[in-house]
Image: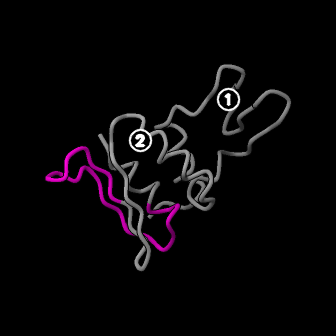
Amino acid sequence: MMTDNELNEAVAIKLDDFKPNEHKVGNVILRGNSLSFPYPLYSTDIKAAWEVVDYVCAKGYSVTVGQNPCRCLIWKTHEDFNSIAEADTAPRAICEAFLKLP
């Protein structure tokens, strides 16, 4: 299982989460006049994880996030779930499901 930092990095890379006025130096992201070190906290912060959900939905997928257990399902048609992940927290489930997408 990936650590939170490894998961955050993998999600950031898959999202290509660098905006026009950002630069990456090692694992530090320079955003304007501020630093984001090392990556957004996708795996622990629901607000950051929801940016992943918004990105996936914009690509034409549907997303369901549930609790007890925390589970994220991502699909394009109801007959074919493209990705399912279960984790201790909703943000982590979102990240793990996102990384399973092609």
* Mark 1 or 2, nearer chain start: 1
The residue tagged 2 is 56
On the image, which quarter does residue 4 sit in? bottom right
Is 71 drawn above or below residue 15 in the view shown? below
Q: Main secondary structure of the magenta part?
A: strand
- Tell me: 86 left or right of 3: left
Crowding near the residue tagged with mark 1, few <14, some 14–19, many ≥20 C-alpha atoms within 10 Å: few
For the residues marked 1 and 2, what is the alpha-carbon distance in whole angstroms? 23 Å
Please provide percent x and percent y for residue 97: 37, 55
Label count reads 2
Is 20 drawn above or below residue 100 in the view shown? above
- Residue beneath the point at 55% across and 45% down: 51
- Tell me: 23 left or right of 98: right
Give, as a single range, the part of the protein colored magenta.
Answer: 73-93
Residue type at tag 2? Val
- Tell me: 79 left or right of 69: left
Crowding near the residue tagged with mark 2, few <14, some 14–19, many ≥20 C-alpha atoms within 10 Å: some
- Residue beneath the point at 25% across and 49% down: 82
Specify the label residue 89 is tagged with.
none
Please provide percent x and percent y for residue 95: 46, 54
Is 50 drawn above or below residue 90 in the view shown? above
Q: Nearer the viewer, residue 50 or 39?
A: 50
Q: Is residue 32 magenta?
A: no
The residue tagged 1 is 24
Position of the C terminus by quadrant: top left
Is 71 drawn above or below residue 101 in the view shown? below
Residue type at tag 1? Lys
- Residue beneath the point at 42% across and 35% down: 58
Q: Secondary structure at mark 2?
A: helix
Please provide percent x and percent y for residue 27: 66, 39
